[in-house]
Image (spheres, rainbow, N blue to C red):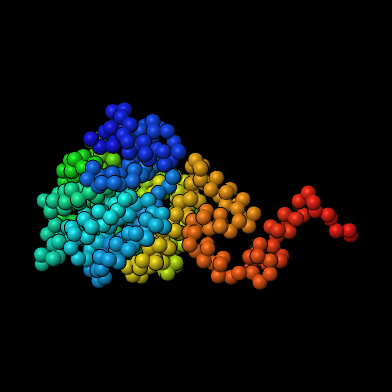
Amino acid sequence: MTQLISARNGIITPQMQASAAAENIDAETLRKRIAEGVAVLPMNIKHENCRATGIGFGLKTKVNANIGTSREHCFLEEEIKKLEVSIEAGADTVMDLSTGGNLDEIRKILISRCPIPLGSVPIYQCVVDLMNEGKSAAELDEARIIDTVHRHAESGVDFITIHSGVTKRAVQKMARKTRIMDVVSRGGSFLVSWIRAHGKENPFYTCYDKLIEIALEYDVTFSLGDGLRPGCLHDASDDLQFDELLVLGELRDRAVEAGVQVMIEGPGHVPLADVQSNIALQKTICKGAPFYVLGPLVTDVAPGYDHIAGAIGGAIAAAYGADFLCFLTPSEHLRLPTVEDTREGVIATRLAAHAGDIAKGIAGARQWDDEMSRARRNRDWEKMYQLALDPKRAKQYHTSAPPAGDKDVCTMCGDLCSIKQAEKALSKTFEAPTL
Ligand code: SF4
């Protein structure tokens, strides 16, 4: 029985209890949200010791880190390190996007070491397996999709990106060439090629009911992928993006009705002024389903700093109701992220999620800031390190520049420390200088 079916039957599962406790809300509230499909608890029955992590309405905004090999750069040890660093830096989930090496083996090893929900993108494996067999992506068929999704579910994957929303109708519309970037999703581009080669409907769409059956068996959460997401500001909020969103709304209804938990993936690249309307549209069309956004990047001109461009969009998106932020790293658009990039990406995205949580009024979010402010006023450096989003960096920066004189200040203002001056001025024993 999936968490959604249990919730609908009025059952509060141990996972709901654990997730509600972590969120400081009561388990019955979470059960109701899961039953309504506005929150999910991705947790494959085969993934042992996985932390119960609720994603959705009224819950803390969650952060995903992408890891995984590529065909150009394939070192399992490095990906294991990225997994460890992501968890240490506070990611709530990870996705294995591997395309290089033995994909079944890599996924198995990563899941066995992963105490948080792990997601995957089965279409990558479908295409990589075809290539390894000396075939082309055009030879993809329903049988291969069903088999691959089943292998991912059987191995314990908690959520999978399903690219069922790229339809023949949208691909026909693309012939008008109104976009600068056309298609930037890898899954989306494979399917556009397939549909153009065969002139038939997307096989991920036509075998969707079979995929629902697999998800029901293992309680795999669907993350309905946006294969036609905008890849630059120019292409944002166009008919292709929203045409696909309408299809995702329909697919959401079919899966939720059957008892499968569903999230919806979103853009991508979106001008700051359009972020709020993008969230509102998704929430309306998809009946409040948890929204999982990639960034969104609010400018296209920051290669090397795209984790910042994404965090700006992510904070605004979270403030307006996005539930789940996929990280971006400084390597976005340039190379496969390194271990350090992965860490930077998680921290930047957690910052965005937390800023959004303060705006959304998530229970406990603001208290964290107030505690930090008290520690800062008291120049309690140890406490500040402890409370920092990135304790290691806070300590490293502060201790790298010890003040020459007064140790109770930092080198920013030294003996002009405003906090200390104000403390003295406002203390009861303070004697005002005679003017
Ligand atoms: S010296 Fe300046 S920056 Fe440092 S603690 Fe005092 S007010 Fe803050």
Residue found at the very far top of the displayed protein? 10
Residue 276 in the image, given as x and y percentages of width and height: 46, 48
Q: How many marks?
A: 0
Instruction: Tell me if residue 312 can be seen.
Output: no
Task: Look at the image and tell me in which quarter the N terminus lies.
Answer: top left
Residue 44 in the image, given as x and y percentages of width and height: 25, 44
Q: Seen in the image, is 100 located left or right of residue 318? A: left
Residue 127 in the image, given as x and y percentages of width and height: 18, 60
Camera-nearest residue between 181 and 368: 368
Residue drawn 30% across the image and 29% down it? 11
- Vertical side of 263 occupied by 14: above or below: above
Residue drawn 18% across the image and 59% down it? 105
Image quadrant where residue 74 sits: bottom left
- Vertical side of 103 occupied by 428: above or below: above
Residue drawn 40% across the image and 62% down it? 343
Instruction: Tell me if residue 22 can be seen.
Output: yes
- Vertical side of 304 occupied by 187: above or below: above
Residue drawn 32% across the image and 59% down it? 83
Q: Seen in the image, is 265 located left or right of residue 208? A: right
Q: Seen in the image, is 140 located left or right of residue 393? A: left
